[in-house]
Image (cartoon, coloured by chain):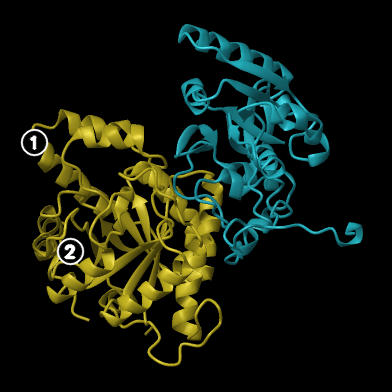
Chain colours: A yellow, B cyan
């Protein structure tokens, strides 16, 4: 066992894993975090705590994770390369582990130009690949990036990374996933999937390379409440593939929320049947309350005991 | 070449508002090639300033001068006497020229008329694009000759982020994703292996992170 996290245990046990997401607030109110935590409590195997997502300032992911732990949640702390150099990152990795964090998801991060401080200097001292390798080095080699030893109490973290099957160049995406696994990614969460065909094609390539046996791949899914959200993402978010058919179904729905849940459940069923998919990662952005409803209806509750 | 872009005219006017006689100094090097600071640009800007001053009901005398290069004493020393007769110098060279002037003529103030942008080249007529960030540790050998430090918004070393779509960078729809270009080029050269190794964290000390940088050419030192 690398970290002893619940997520790791569930995946090792061969259970279909479920993770979800909690976005910290744009203020210092711990109650917001506690309230959102309640939607996930006992319903999922890990909760991503986003790190200033879309480059908008929010409560620190590690602080929010600590609050989530106090509520009984197992957090997956997200760490992006945009805001910290290698010194601050290693310091925060130690700090997170000391606070009881057992999962860390490494990302390059949304570019600062998309957030509320587009004037900021982006750091990107390391890229996501280098961050993954650094966390692995701290855990497995018990060394800092500079090779100095961590004499005891090295951070025992289950290392996550992301993959976007819908970005270009498409053929390189599988090779890049292979690199992330080689760097040390124990699990992968994908970009939101709406285009099941393209995702299946990508997974075929992943399976062909045998990568699904070297890491656990969680398919990213996003329940949406309106067709407008889909149209917005289609037009404004690079590296998203949203088939018109889904937009039409949402638009035609009498009860779009119900339709959104229905579509998401369909997708859960579909990805479950794709070889190499070890679980799902739900991203109900701004609609956290739907998580337990969705999982209940998808037959993913109760979560297995591990 | 170094590419520079003229400061907004109002900002230039404001910077010289207290002076009655200035020298407007161009440069015959890079900024001549990128149209913003050669002798023609000097001539145009001088008349523009005079007209604006006239409209304000004010007089200004402008001496025009465009040395071969503003970044070497040898070329700017020829202007010494004229410089001493002015209240200030307005330079439309790059930032190196402005600083060379200030260091060489410490009793006169040389003001910047340009925003120095980057090192690049004209990809087509009248369009210059950044190509080199002067990071001090060239990676072009394994990237197929395309620089991810100058051209990737995140300065990534291990391939494109998830924001690469149809060859375009998510940060700016008018900018190619350099990692797509790197991928395409290496594929063409049959060198995709270059991208498979995990590139280690780099030493940024060679870049702008360790203070002022120097280059010594030992053999030629006196």
Q: Are marks 2 and 1 on the same chain?
A: yes
Which dot marks residue A255? 1
Residue under label 2: A300
Who is closer to the viewer here, A259 or B156? B156
**Going 40% across and 86% down the picture, which residue do you hit?**
A154
Residue A174: image location, x then y, percent: 52, 55
Q: Dot 1 falls on which chain? A: A
Q: Report in which chain the residue with disc 2 lies.
A: A
Q: Which residue appears farthest toward the bottom when viewing the image?
A: A152
**Could you say which is closer to the camera, residue A24 or residue B24?**
B24
Total marks shown come to: 2
> Please, what secondary structure does the residue beneath circle 2 have?
loop
Which circle's residue, 2 or 1, is located before the other in the chain? 1
Measured along the vertical axis of the image, is residue B167 above or below residue B49? below
Q: Is residue A276 visible?
A: no
User: Is residue A165 or residue A29 the one in the foreground?
Assistant: A29
Q: Residues within 10 Å of mark 2 (few under 14, many from 20)?
A: some
Rendering quarter of residue A10:
bottom left
Q: Secondary structure at mark 1?
A: loop
Which corner quadrant holds the N terminus of chain B? top right
Q: Report whether B6 appears left or right of B215.
A: left
Q: Residue B193: where, in percent of width, then height? A: 68, 58
């Amino acid at each position: 066992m690398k970290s002893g996290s619940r997520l790791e245990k569930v995946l090792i046990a061969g259970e279909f894993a479920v993770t979800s997401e909690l976005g910290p607030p744009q203020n210092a109110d711990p109650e917001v975090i506690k309230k959102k935590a309640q939607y996930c409590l006992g319903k999922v195997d890990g909760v991503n705590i986003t790190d200033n997502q879309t480059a908008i300032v929010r409560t620190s992911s590690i602080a929010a994770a600590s609050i989530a732990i106090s509520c009984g949640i197992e957090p997956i702390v997200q760490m992006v390369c945009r805001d910290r150099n290698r010194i601050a990152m290693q310091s925060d990795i130690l700090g997170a582990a000391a606070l009881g964090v057992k999962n860390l998801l490494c990302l390059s991060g949304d570019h600062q130009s998309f957030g509320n401080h587009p004037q900021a200097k982006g750091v990107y001292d390391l890229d996501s690949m280098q961050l993954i390798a650094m966390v692995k080095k701290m855990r497995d080699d018990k060394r800092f990036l500079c090779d100095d030893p961590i004499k005891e109490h090295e951070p025992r973290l289950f290392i996550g990374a992301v993959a976007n099957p819908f970005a270009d160049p498409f053929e390189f995406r599988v090779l890049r996933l292979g690199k992330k696994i080689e760097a040390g990614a124990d699990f992968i969460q994908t970009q939101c999937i709406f285009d099941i065909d393209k995702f299946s094609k990508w997974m075929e390539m992943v399976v062909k390379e045998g990568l699904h046996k070297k890491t656990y791949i969680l398919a990213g899914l996003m329940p949406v409440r309106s067709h407008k959200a889909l149209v917005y993402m289609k037009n404004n978010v690079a590296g998203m593939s949203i088939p018109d058919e889904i937009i039409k179904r949402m638009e035609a729905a009498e009860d779009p929320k119900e339709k959104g849940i229905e579509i998401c459940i369909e997708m859960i069923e579909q990805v479950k049947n794709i070889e190499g998919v070890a679980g799902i990662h739900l991203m109900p952005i701004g609609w956290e309350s739907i998580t337990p409803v969705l999982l209940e209806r998808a037959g993913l509750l109760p979560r297995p005991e591990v | 070449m170094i590419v520079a872009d003229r400061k907004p005219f109002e900002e230039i006017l404001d910077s010289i508002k207290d002076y009655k006689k200035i020298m407007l100094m161009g440069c015959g090097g890079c900024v001549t090639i990128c149209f913003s600071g050669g002798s023609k640009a000097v001539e145009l800007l001088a008349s523009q300033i005079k007209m604006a001053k006239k409209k304000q009901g004010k007089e200004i005398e402008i001496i025009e001068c465009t040395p071969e290069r503003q970044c070497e004493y040898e070329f700017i020393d020829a202007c010494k006497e004229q410089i001493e007769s002015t209240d200030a110098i307005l330079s439309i060279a790059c930032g190196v020229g402005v600083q060379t002037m200030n260091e060489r003529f410490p009793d006169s103030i040389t003001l910047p008329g340009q925003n120095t942008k980057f090192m690049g080249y004209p990809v087509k007529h009248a369009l210059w694009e950044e190509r080199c960030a002067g990071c001090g540790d060239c990676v072009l050998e394994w990237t197929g000759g395309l620089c991810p430090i100058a051209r990737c918004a995140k300065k990534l070393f291990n391939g494109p982020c998830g924001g690469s779509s149809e060859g375009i960078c998510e940060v700016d729809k008018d900018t190619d994703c350099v990692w797509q270009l790197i991928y395409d080029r290496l594929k063409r050269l049959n060198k995709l292996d270059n991208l498979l190794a995990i590139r280690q964290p780099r030493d940024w000390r060679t870049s702008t992170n360790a203070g002022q940088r120097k280059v010594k050419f030992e053999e030629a030192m006196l």
